[in-house]
Image (cartoon, rainbow, N blue to C red):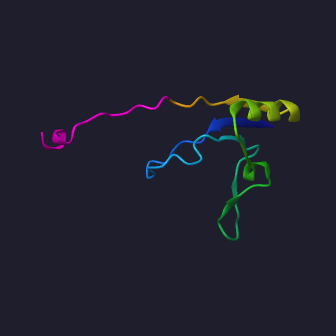
Amino acid sequence: MNARIYQIQKNALQSGKALTHKWVLEYAPAEAKQADPLTGWAGSGDTQQQLKLSFPSQEAAIAYAQKQGVAYTVIATPPKTLKLQAYADNFR
């Protein structure tokens, strides 16, 4: 079992920063999805893919993974960059 630990990013369509302070532990897929011959929907027998655990901090997520014996990878949060621009720059 392999897991990814990352911090929730703000959606591009959002202006607020709600829930961006939480950290998520998400299991990596153990098997590939296969198309169902009758419906054509993709699915697999791996139920760990459906599980997303949220934690208040990165340390709490790492402690949980270590306690459960799960191999994990921490995905660093990219730095936030602001594009400072004057309103007049829209007309140049």
- The residue at the point 64 percent across, 41 percent down is 22
* Residue 64 x %, y %: 81, 35
Image mark count: 0
Residue 71 part of the magenta segment: no
* Residue 89 x %, y %: 17, 38
Question: In the figure, 87 relative to 83: above or below?
Answer: below
Q: In which quarter of the image is the N terminus?
A: top right
- The residue at the point 67 percent across, 70 percent down is 39
Residue 86 part of the magenta segment: yes
The residue lying furthest to the bottom in this view is 38
Question: In the figure, 88 relative to 45: above or below?
Answer: above
* Front one among 76 and 50: 76
* Front one among 4 and 85: 85
Name the image quarter holding residue 35.
Answer: bottom right
Chief secondary structure of the magenta span? Answer: loop
* Front one among 81 and 29: 81
Task: Answer with left or right where residue 86 lies relative to residue 43.
Answer: left
Q: Quadrant of the C terminus?
A: top left
Name the image quarter holding residue 66.
Answer: top right
* Residue 51 x %, y %: 75, 50
- The residue at the point 80 percent across, 34 percent down is 65
> Bounds of the magenta span?
79-92
- The residue at the point 80 percent across, 31 percent down is 63
* Residue 90 x %, y %: 18, 43
